[in-house]
Image (cartoon, rainbow, N blue to C red):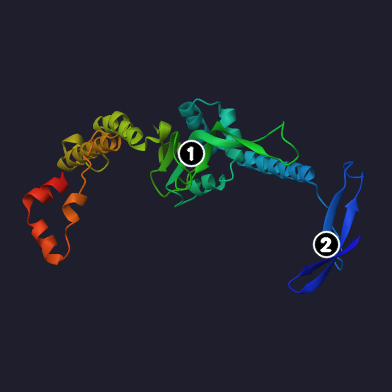
Amino acid sequence: TESKYHRLGGNLKTRSTELGSAVTGSSLTTVLPASTTVKKSIILPSESRKELAKQAKVTKEERRAQIDGRHRYLISRLADGIDLSEQQVEETIISDDKFQLIEQFFAPSGLKKLLFFYQDVLQQKLNASSRSDGSTNSLPQKKLFITMGSTEDFTGTCAFFLRTSDEVITTSNVSQEVNFGMFDCTNGNILQGLEFFLSQIMIPALKSQQKWGAVKEGLKNSQIQEFLYSVDKFVGALSSSRQNIEDKIQLTKVDIDIYVRNLQNPSDYITAGNSYTKVNTMML
């Protein structure tokens, strides 16, 4: 059927093409310019999903073939720390769209850190009882994923790997060149998680450290003692900040309108500023 559509003051001739029961038993109508020659077949949504799934499977298998001892080291640490099986962690990693960050972490002078979040994320679920409009439900589900740490809210557990040098990471040196750690941020309480990690894990580990590289005196060295003292002070500051955020300190609301409503000119403000009673009341 030929129809005319008026657009921007001109006539656009279009021709609709009907695909009958040979496709899915229902008709599909597309409107194209009459001069357009269709060379490619039209892909239905279900077929498109199948194609994407096929491509994703190929990508996963290519990544699986790249896994070596370095990846196994990361996988085993993550599995132990998060209480998942190594197979589950492997499947998660090779399915992640940020998989390339792992290779960048292994490269010489590569990324200094590699972060994983394990937390609730919204998963799109197809509503089986819905109509063909494709409406979905968003359901929270625990998921492990690679992250840069700046694009997603941190509300669960963070597992991190840190490099100790710019050397290329190999299967033979990965256990010496890469450090692993975790801290918990359940319910989004980052300060509490960091405070616990430093006070209960890092500081005890540092204070039990016997070798400090070129510093022969070890813990007896004044610079080492000053460093540990600074870390203790930092943890104390974290604790104070957390308590402030948790409303441990309540500020009294002051109605300052009764003090400023009659201020009309600069001299009035100067006089009020010199009044200890007024200033003290407004500052409390």
| Picture quarter with the C terminus | top left
* Marks 1 & 2, CB-CB < 8 Å contact: no
Q: Quadrant of residue 274?
A: bottom left
Give left or right: position of 150 versus 97: left
Amino acid under disc 1: Phe
Q: Position of residue 51 (x, y in %)?
A: 76, 45
| Picture quarter with the N terminus | bottom right
Label 1: few (<14), some or many (≥20) within 10 Å? some
Amino acid under disc 2: Leu
Q: Quadrant of residue 236?
A: top left
Q: Quadrant of residue 266?
A: bottom left
Give left or right: position of 20 versus 126: right
Q: Which residue is mark 1?
A: 116
Q: Position of residue 45 (x, y in %)?
A: 77, 45
Give left or right: position of 91 versus 281: right
Q: Find residue 32 and name its label.
A: 2
Foreground pick, 219 / 146: 146
For the view shown, which residue lies furthest in the bottom direction? 9
Foreground pick, 62 / 236: 236
Helix, strand or loop for disc 2: strand
Q: Find residue 283 and name its label.
A: none
Of the residues tagged 1 and 2, which is closer to the observer?
Answer: 2
Identity of the residue drawn at 58% across and 41% down: 96
Q: Position of residue 129 (x, y in %)?
A: 72, 31
Foreground pick, 180 / 131: 131
Q: Is residue 5 above or below residue 20?
A: below
Identity of the residue drawn at 20% across and 41% down: 230
For the view shown, which residue lies furthest in the front direction? 262
Q: Earlier in the sequence, mark 1 or mark 2?
A: 2
Q: Position of residue 39 (x, y in %)?
A: 86, 60
Identity of the residue drawn at 37% across and 35% down: 189
